[in-house]
Amino acid sequence: MHFHLSLSLNATKTHTHTNTPVKPLAVNILNATESLAAHKEYQIVCQSTGARPNAVIQWTKGKKTLKRVKEHAVRNTTYSVLTFVPTVEDDGRLLGCRAQNPKVAGLFLEHFQNISVHYPPVVVLQLGSTLAMDDIKEGDDIYFECKIQSNPSWRRLTWLHNGVQLPQNSSSTKIVRSNQSLVIQKVTRYSSGSYQCGALNSEGETLSNEIVLNIKYVPLCATDKIVSIGVSLDETITVSCDIITHPLASKFYWRFENSEEVLEIEQHRFSSNGSSSQLHYTPASEQDYGTLSCWGTNEIGTMAEPCIFHLIAAGLPTSVINCSWRNFTNSFEVNCHQGYDGGLKQSFVLEMLSSRYPGHSINLTNAEEPIFSITSFDQLRQQLPPAGHHKPDSLKLYVYSVNQKGHSPRIFIADLLIPAAPEVAAPSPDPKSNLLTPILIGLFLTILLIIVIIIVRIYLKSKRLKQNINKEKRYTEESKNTLLLVDIAKKDKPTKTTKWMNNVGSSIKTKTKVETIDDEQDPDLIPYPRLTDIHQEELIPINSTSSAFAIKHQQLAHSPQELELDKAGREKGPDRFYHQANHHPHGHQSVRTGAGTYRDEEISEAEINLKGIEDFLMTNRVPESCV
C-alpha cells in the first residue's frame, strides 16, 4: 500500500513537470536579407527551437504583419517560410521574426534583420524652385535639379535636350553642370524644348520625367530675305507677312515708303491672326511702287527688324541670248545667257518637240541659269511613248524664260537626232549549264538504255525457258511413241534387223563417254533422258502409230486376218525413220519366238533413214557426240 502511493505521487509530479509551458530557447532568420533585387520573389526561413509546446511564429516588416507564411514543426523545432517580394520602399526597413509560446503570451523571442533592396535609380527632374515655368523669356537664367534615389549609388548622370545629350560644361553654350543640377545662362528661343536627366548604377539606367520649356521671345520674321514682288498697274496682290513668335503677336503694323514719302497703312486695310498678317495692295501709279514693311508685337516686345517686300513693275522676261550647243554620241549640252527677268524671279526651260509624235514634248527646267545637260539619250527615250523606245526620232530644241507674268519667246537651238535604242542582247547561256546539259542527257540515255537491256534480257530468258519446256514435253511424247523396248530372244539367228540394232547399239555405246563429257561442257543444254541408259540392243524403230501393245498383239496373232490388219496399220502410218519398200501382200515368212511369230520379211525390206534420225536428235538438242 505504501509502495503504490509513492509510485502514484511520483507519476503525478512527472506529468506536471512535462506540461509546464516553456518559451523558445532560440529564434533565427536563416536567410540573409541584404542585396535583394527589387520585385523579385524570395523564400525566407525563420527557425525556432526549445519551446514547449511548439512555438507560433509571426513575421513583421516595420509595423506591418506579413501573411504569406507556411509553417511546420519537427519535434520541438518550428520552421516558418515567408514568401517575400521586396519593393523600392522596403529598402532600409527591418524584417522581424517573433516566436511565441501559444499558451503564454509573454513567452517569446524575436530576431530582426535589415532589408537592403537593390534597384535601378529612381530619377525625378525638377525645375528650379525659384522659377515659374510659364514666365521664362529670352535672356533669363534657368536651372534644373535631378533627384536620384538609388541602391547601390549611381555612378553616372546625363542631361538631355530634345533627346540629345548635352555636352559637359561649355562656355559657348553657357551650360553649367554641378553635382545633380543643370544651369543654363541667358536662354534663347532655341532653348525651348524638353529636358530630361538620366542616372546609371549596377542595376541599370533610368531616365527621368520630361520638363518642356517654352521660352518667350519677341516676334521674328519667318524669312530673313527681302522678298521682291512684281505687280502691274491696277493689279491687286496679297502680301503675307509671316512671323515666328511666342506668345502670339497681339498687333501688326504696316508701312509703305518710296524715294519721296513714308506712309503708315491703316489697320482696316490688312488682317492678322497672331502669327501672320495679310495686306491687299493695288498700285495705281508709278508712285505706288516701293517698299512695304511689316512688324509684329507681343507681350515681350516688338520685332527689332521688320519683314520687307519690294514692289516692282512686273513684265514678261526677255528671251535668252548667245545660245550654243554640243552634241555627243549619247549626250548633249545647251548653254545660253539670260536676258532681263521682267522685274521678277525667272527660271529657264529647255523644250524638246518630237517629230515622230507631233504634240509630244519633253521639258527640262533650270531655276538658276539657262544651262542644260543630258548625259544619256535613254533619259529622253523613257519620256517618249512606249512604241518609240526602239525607233529613231528627231527632237526640235527650244529655250525660253519664265516668271510670274509668263514666258519669253522661244529660241530655236537645233534638231537633235535620237537613234533607236539598241536591241537588248539575249543573255548568254551559262557555260556551266552548257556543260551540264549534255552530261544530263547522256546520263538519262544511259539509264534508259540499261532499263531497255534489262527488260529485253528478261523477256528473252523467259521466252527461251518457255521454248525449252515445250521442247522437253514434245521430246518426251515422241520418245514414248517412237522408242520401244523389246526383249529379243537370244536364241534366234541374227537377221538384218538384229544386225542393224546391234550396229546402232554399238555406235551409241561408243559415244556414251564422249556424250557425257559434251553435256557437261555445254551447260546451256537442258538435260534429257539419255538413250544410253537403255539397252541399245533393245532399240527398235517402229511406225509412229505403232506401240508396244501393237507389237505384242502382232506377236500373239495366229490368224491371217489379224496379220493383215496389222500390216495395213503400218502402211497407213509410215515411220519417219524408215522408207517402206516392195510390200508383198502374200507369202510372209514368220519367225517363231517364245511369245509368238515375228515377220522378218518386213524388217528386211525396211531401209534405215539416217538423215531423219540425225534431224530428230539435233532438233531435240541431243549432244552432237550422240549424233
Image (cartoon, rainbow, N blue to C red):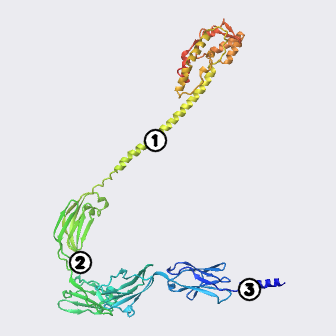
**Closer to the camera in the image, 218 or 63:** 63
Eye-nearest disc, 2 or 3: 3
Q: CA distance from mark 2 to mark 3?
A: 123 Å
Seen in the image, is 159 located left or right of residue 492?
A: left
Mark 3 is on which residue type? Thr
- Give the residue at mark 3: 16
Numbered circle sitting on residue 75: none
Cβ atoms at labels 1 and 2 below 8 Å apart: no
Task: State whether residue 84 is above or below residue 526.
Answer: below
Quarter of the image where the C terminus is located: top right
- Determine the image quadrant of residue 284: bottom left
Residue 370 location (% of width, % of height): 20, 71
Q: Residue at x 26, y 60 (%)?
A: 356
Cβ atoms at labels 1 and 3 below 8 Å apart: no
Eye-nearest disc, 1 or 3: 3
Seen in the image, is 224 located left or right of residue 16?
A: left
Q: Residue at x 27, y 65 (%)?
A: 360
Q: Is residue 213 visible?
A: no
Numbered circle sitting on residue 405: 2
- Give the residue at mark 1: 448
